Amino acid sequence: MTLREKKKEKSSLRKRASVFWKILVVCLVAFSFMSLVIIATLFLSNVRLSQFPIIGQKVAVIPVKGEITLDGCSVSIFGGGDCASVTAIKNDLQLADDDPSIKAIVLDINSGGGGAVPSRELERAVKNTKKPIVACIRETGASGAYYIASAADHIVADRDSITGSIGVIMTFQQTYGLYEKLGLNVTVIKSGKVKDIGSPYREMTAEEKDELKRMIDKIYLDFVEDVAANRNLSIEYVMNISDGSLYLGSEAQKLGLVDTLGGIDDAIDIASNMGGVSGKPTVQKSKNEQGSILDYFLKN
């Protein structure tokens, strides 16, 4: 074998060795990567991501603003009246309760109340939520809105907020006097003597007023009993302070209707502590508030 041929053979051996080592390195890297993926999969199957400080440290803020209603808010091109939709808020509560990254919930309340049925439905939803809930009464948390707040684990209210108004009211607008003056007559054909109870076309009888008062008293008693149970107060005590009176936040705290005086930041801090959040939490705000069609186009 000539010297030239020997050099060619050595060069060929070097190339084959280089290719071999490159293939070996690629295989080792691929093997290491697959091993890491398998280990990570096995690890995360037993450990929730929410247990990591950076990922699972959220507090959800859910607005309860405007009239509490079973139906959604009506929206026009100019805007819709503020309302707290029971369906939307219950959905937000469920999503927050099911999200492992959310440790606690804050209800951002600014409402004068609403119907007895929607208010009670939300009160039940708050009570049945597993995670800690802090109710924050900003400007107003009265009547049905306070009913909902009472089911929270802790209530924060601004010292000058309007709270309370624990009571039930039913109103009827009657126009029969005006109709008589105008010479208008309305004929009602009915199957029972109280079928048109509350009719605006005639004066209400004493028996009808008694029947409606009986219904109001029953709803009122349910309201009082639930608030008493939620706030760990006696029914007699709650009845004594539940004549429909409005209280400032500072007064409500002295009466035991509110736990802490403060604002939304205080409520978030308290909720964080109750949920075991370490450090400053990430605030996740719900977007169930209604706007106008015009607002939608301006934002988009």
Image: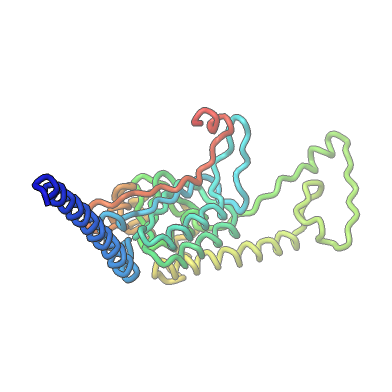
Q: Residue 209 in the image: x percent, y percent? A: 71, 59
Residue 54 visible within the image: yes
Is residue 43 rendered to the left or right of residue 232? left
Taking the spot 27% from the left edge, 65% from the top edge, the residue there is 35
Residue toward you, 86 or 41: 41
Give the image quarter of residue 46.
bottom left
Count of numbered tags:
0
Residue toward you, 61 or 297: 297
Taking the spot 31% from the left edge, 52% from the top edge, the residue there is 268
In this view, the residue farthest toward the left is: 3
Taking the spot 37% from the left edge, 55% from the top edge, the residue there is 252
Q: Residue 51 in the image: x percent, y percent? A: 29, 63
Residue 256 visible within the image: no
Q: Residue 132 in the image: x percent, y percent? A: 36, 63
Q: How is the image coloured?
A: rainbow
Q: Residue 84 in the image: x percent, y percent? A: 53, 49
- From what the image shows, is residue 173 above or below residue 291? below
Taking the spot 28% from the left edge, 53% from the top edge, the residue there is 269
In this view, the residue farthest toward the front is: 1
